Image (cartoon, rainbow, N blue to C red):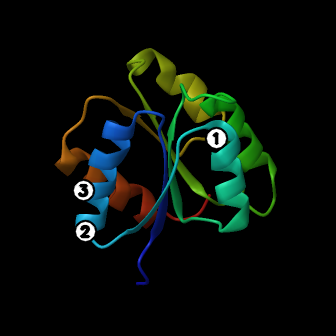
Amino acid sequence: MATARILIVEDHPTMREAMRLVLEGEGFQISEAADGPSALEAIRQDVPDLVFLDLHIPGMTGADVLTAVKADPTTAGVRVIVVTADGEEGREPAMAMGADEYFTKPFSPITLLKTVERVLAAPEA
């Protein structure tokens, strides 16, 4: 299988760096965005296989980014893992907006990798 391309959308540089290091260590190709508008631009310019999307990002909310990605036929198939510190109460609304998985901070590197593998292995919706 070709190396999956993953976009990390996270406004905290330390969190972005930690996720990038774990994923690159497993051979994934990583790109990053720190806010909503640059995330959408990155997704449209070079459609990734998977997006880690923080809900609380500057420019536009993660929910707005998720809605835009899922509404656009060219990006609707992109798998999106919502990453948030909100806790489990945000799971249902995120999944209803089209997220493929809901992931809460803080998390372990092993949990991160297992979630990526599970989402990428799932058949396309």
User: Which of 18/96 is in front?
Assistant: 18
Label 1 – label 3 distance at C-alpha: 25 Å
Classify mark 3: residues with Cα within 10 Å, few (<14), some (14-19) or many (20+).
some
- Contact between marks 3 and 2 (CB within 8 A): the answer is yes
**Mark nearer the N terminus (1 vs 3):** 3
Residue pointed to by mark 2:
26
Is 117 rendered above or below residue 29?
above
Type of residue at label 1?
A: Gly
Q: Nearer the viewer, mark 1 or mark 3?
A: 3
Label 3 – label 2 distance at C-alpha: 7 Å
Type of residue at label 2?
A: Glu
Residue pointed to by mark 3:
22
Q: Is mark 2 on a helix, strand or loop?
A: loop
Q: Position of residue 13 (x, y in %)?
A: 38, 39
Is 33 rendered above or below residue 50?
above
Horizontal side, residue 91 vs residue 78: left or right: left
Label 2 – label 1 distance at C-alpha: 26 Å
Horizontal side, residue 25 vs residue 20: left or right: left
- Contact between marks 1 and 3 (CB within 8 A): the answer is no
Horizontal side, residue 58 vs residue 23: left or right: right
Q: Position of residue 28 (x, y in %)?
A: 36, 69
